Amino acid sequence: MKKIFSTIFVLFFLILPGFAGEETPFVFEDFIEGDMPPVVDGRIVDSYLPDQTSQTKYIRINFHFMLDDTGNGNFTETDNGCYLPSDPLSVQHTGYWYSRKVINMANYRLYDNKQMNLLPGNNTPVLNTRYRYVLKGVYFHRNSQLCQFTLSSGYGSTLNNTYGEDLGEAINIFFTQKLPTSNAAGFAVMSGNRYVVMHAAWEGYCTNFTNGYGLWVVAGALNHEIGHNLSLYHTMRLNYGPCSWSWDDYCDDTPTRQEAYDITLVDPCCGWNGGNNPNCSNNLMDYSGSHALTPDQIARVHYCLVNSMCNYWTYSYSDFDINGNMTSTIVIKPGEDIILDGSPAVTEDDKYFVSVQKSDKWFNRYGTEHMRWLTAQEVTQIGAFDIRNFCDGELTLEEGCYYRVKLAVESWHEKTLLIYISGALEDRVPVMTSNALPYGVAEASSVYSAGGYDYNAWKAFDGEDQSGGGNWTMWISQYQSPYQSQWVSYEFEVPTYAAGYYILPELGYCEDRAPKNWRLEGFNGNCWMNLDEQENILINQDWTSAGLDFPIDVPRLYQKYRLKVKEVNGSEVVSVRRLKLKGPSPADMVPIMESNNLPTGVAQASSIYLSNTAYDAWKAFDGDDESSSSWTMWISNPAFPFVSEWLSFQLPSDCYVTGYFILPQLDGLSDRAPKTWNFEAWNGSTWVVLDQQTNITWGTAGKTFQLQDPGSYDKYRLVVTQVHGSDVVSIRQLKLLGNPVD
Ligand SMILES: [Zn+2]
């Protein structure tokens, strides 16, 4: 790990259309300290390049409008502040409206990545940036001392320290008033609690009232400044603005000014609107107003988000991705309304359509392709949705089923899909008898010991739910006064979905040890992601005589979870009698097949009995579990002696299969049942053996086999090398048990 200390200047000059005048460089200074591992010479390794399967990362953003003491000089809560009485839109264009517009436009510009101009003729890939913003809060501050942009050192940090919200978990954007003598500018920090100071956006709005409100420019400037927050340097300019011939931005695929000039004999550092000239830089991190980002730049952003800004990530069902990607998953319970939070980043003219999908299988946010959406209905107002009212009022939510609700938003001629899941969940943690048995690992930040008895981490996972009664099988943290944050964690053997969790503190005695403020977190390999947060859960009010269930809005595959208790109800220790991590049990990833390739996926076999399609491969995936009477099964062609036959299924997308279920033909012809076999997955170039079984005998039922070393693959097969005496193998049902992969 290389620690880089540098003093850099980050400043962006923004010339709003309608603003006359020469660009006047200011110099601000900001002292930056940052960690940049694992990099070579400051460069990000390619493993952070996003591809089609990379998760889009949503970043929380707070907007702050700086007004003077009398409430003038910026957008307000109730109008646009620039008093254009002839225009009725003045009162509609509040700071809230403007915030949504800017976020929406900024996200659109991130989506609309462009080919870089330089070097001419380059074929540098144009990747989906795969990061977007979610507006978390909009604030208005009346302070004549701080409302106007100044050059003085420490102005930005003063703003952030005074008014910043969710420090370290949201980027705070301060919209300040224009300095009388200046053009527009911005300011951003590259480490610590991230914030941005924007300058003169409101003046640009008022000046461009009939011409797009200056949104395009402000959104571009915002993306540039947030680019600095996300570790991007200027590509050609020094950090205080002027162009350099040899500036190194730590990205190998952005040429220097000199390199471009040597080829084109045109100075590529062209300034505002220069991006329209093919010999000029159109990079977001120059001052052109264009927004091309190269793969290395995007990789730096993702590296930064994963390694030092994971607490800024969020998932919000009011946010959306203009690209039309799925953006969010929340848990709903039967009967629960869907509430949109009132600040969707869409225009007021958008139309919303809601439709519902139902399945008895768990699915990830992308769902299963073959499932049909029930009727879409137009929604005219954002607010509380009772999804039972959709589908012509005939939808009955059933326990044990999973539902997705799609909210399509017509905006930017794209649609956005949002998803909701419901269903029965079960504790995925086994009943633990020690910190590592029967499997997985329980840990805690500290353990209380008294009288030779340890209140170990695993005692929160011991399957024991009985509160009170002098029963002390629970985790208790070490005594410390005053109480400070403590955690208990469980690591699964394989990545596992948790879509909810249950906490039972010690109740009825020592209740002050019950958690009050906490987070449930999942470890992404680099940092702990916030999956759920609860505050002010109080004894005798919320904690009464029973444990409580909490949903995880965006279930993802994590191997390790922890409950981080930041505050308790008065004690110096926290005690947790039971923690359940609840998720869907692994389900058959294969759809119910109607042929070898319908509705989706591909069933194949090494051979079919006498070429009779009645015993085709897909018959083992037809959902028919009946162990007698029917002949819907795969049967291989007779071969004596029996050598080897296989049955495979190609899934429409990668699935994390943790086990499989085989039901042979067991009624009278059990000599056809498999005896010895391999279970394998195709990794793109070769078959990987995931499980081997020998000399398996059968009774009257099928059997489930767990994989010791599962992984994500889209094609699996069963290779049978011995049967119980017959010259064919017959498989009535083969299930691939697991979870879809995000
Ligand atoms: Zn800049």
Image (cartoon, rainbow, N blue to C red):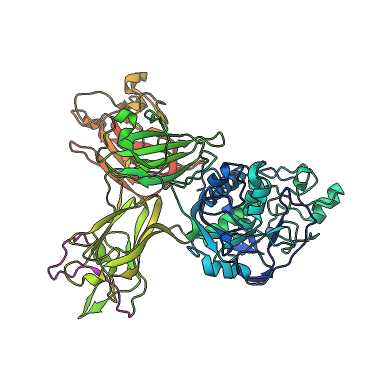
As drawn, the residue found furthest toward the front would be 85
As drawn, the residue found furthest toward the right would be 265
Q: Where does residue 457 sit, x and y in percent of width and height? A: 29, 68
Question: What residue is at 66 percent from the left and 53 percent from the top?
Answer: 203
Q: Is residue 355 above or below residue 94?
A: above
Question: What residue is at 33 percent from the left and 76 percent from the top?
Answer: 483
Q: Is residue 449 above or below residue 611?
A: below
Circle count: 0
Query: Would residue 53 be seen by someone viewing this image from the given angle?
Result: yes
Image quarter (top left, top right, bottom left or bottom right) of the N terminus: bottom right
What secondary structure predominates along the stretch shown in magenta? loop
Q: Where does residue 125 sit, x and y in percent of width and height? A: 66, 44
190 horizontally vs 606: left or right: right
288 horizontally vs 418: left or right: right
198 horizontally vs 466: left or right: right
Query: Would residue 45 be seen by someone viewing this image from the given angle?
Result: no
Q: Is residue 503 above or below residue 598?
A: below
The magenta segment: 462-481
Q: Where does residue 585 sit, x and y in percent of width and height? A: 29, 46
